[in-house]
């Protein structure tokens, strides 16, 4: 059964939030909730590139950081949507091989690394692609934000 783009975004965002909700650390959940709630405003005021750079800087490539998780969720979704047909996917693979010295790495390895390369990719694209990436990221953030608000604890719920 075919799903609308909104349904696809919602499903992906929900799956990501389930993983966050199952995290054992409540401070992590609160950090993710706060980051998801503020990220869309940051994209609209500072831009997508600045927002992604901020998430990367705050996350410090720490796999246990809520900022890193949010960056990875956004990057995985947006890169999948913006490079969804065969021609776009091959162009992305070629770009990854040039810019990340991946040489003759197999397509699966290149695709795996590309899922997390949204920041590098958007700053190297033309303005139309940058706008598409921003629009798609904002649409996805809408779902992440709502699901985070509905399912993750708030700071004042910690004492209960």
Image (cartoon, rainbow, N blue to C red):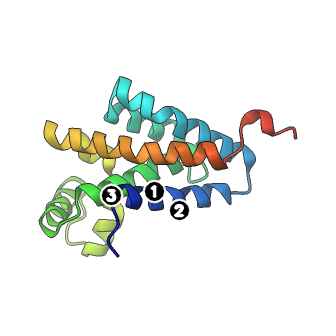
User: Is residue 105 or residue 73 the one in the foreground?
Assistant: 73
Mark 1 touches mark 3? (CB < 8 Å): no
Give neighbour class at mark 2: few <14, some 14-19, many 20+ (Cα, 10 Å). few
The residue to which callout 3 is attached is 5
The CA span between labels 1 and 3 is 9 Å
Residue 125 visible in the picture = no
Q: Residue at x 32, y 35 (%)?
A: 49
Label located before the other in sequence (1 or 3): 3
- Residue 78: x %, y % from top left: 33, 52
The CA span between labels 2 and 3 is 15 Å
Q: Which mark is residue 15?
A: 2
Above or below, 130 against 112 in this view is above
- Residue 23: x %, y % from top left: 68, 57
Above or below, 14 against 71 in this view is below
Secondary element type, mark 3? helix
Using the rendered view, name the quadrant where residue 76 is placed: bottom left
The residue to which callout 1 is attached is 10
Label located before the other in sequence (2 or 3): 3
The CA span between labels 2 and 1 is 8 Å
- Residue 91: x %, y % from top left: 14, 61
6 displayed left or right of 156 = left
Q: Residue at x 38, y 32 (%)?
A: 43
User: Is residue 100 or residue 82 the one in the foreground?
Assistant: 82
| Front label number (2 vs 3) | 3
Give neighbour class at mark 3: few <14, some 14-19, many 20+ (Cα, 10 Å). few
Residue 102 visible in the picture = yes
- Residue 66: x %, y % from top left: 58, 46
| Front label number (2 vs 1) | 1
Give neighbour class at mark 1: few <14, some 14-19, many 20+ (Cα, 10 Å). many
């Amino acid at each position: 059964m075919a799903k609308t783009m909104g349904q696809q975004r919602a499903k992906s965002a929900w799956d990501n939030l389930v993983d966050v909700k199952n995290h054992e650390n409540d401070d992590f959940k609160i950090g993710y909730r706060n980051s998801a709630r503020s990220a869309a405003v940051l994209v609209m005021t500072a831009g997508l590139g600045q927002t992604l750079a901020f998430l990367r800087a705050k996350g410090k490539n720490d796999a246990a950081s809520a900022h890193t998780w949010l960056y990875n969720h956004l990057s995985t979704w947006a890169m999948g949507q913006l490079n969804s047909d065969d021609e776009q996917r091959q162009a992305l693979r070629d770009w990854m091989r040039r810019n990340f010295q991946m040489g003759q790495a197999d397509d699966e390895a290149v695709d795996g690394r590309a899922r997390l390369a949204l920041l590098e990719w958007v700053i190297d694209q033309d303005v139309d692609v940058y706008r598409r990436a921003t629009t798609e990221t904002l649409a996805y953030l809408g779902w992440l934000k709502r699901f985070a608000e509905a399912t993750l604890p708030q700071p004042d719920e910690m004492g209960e």
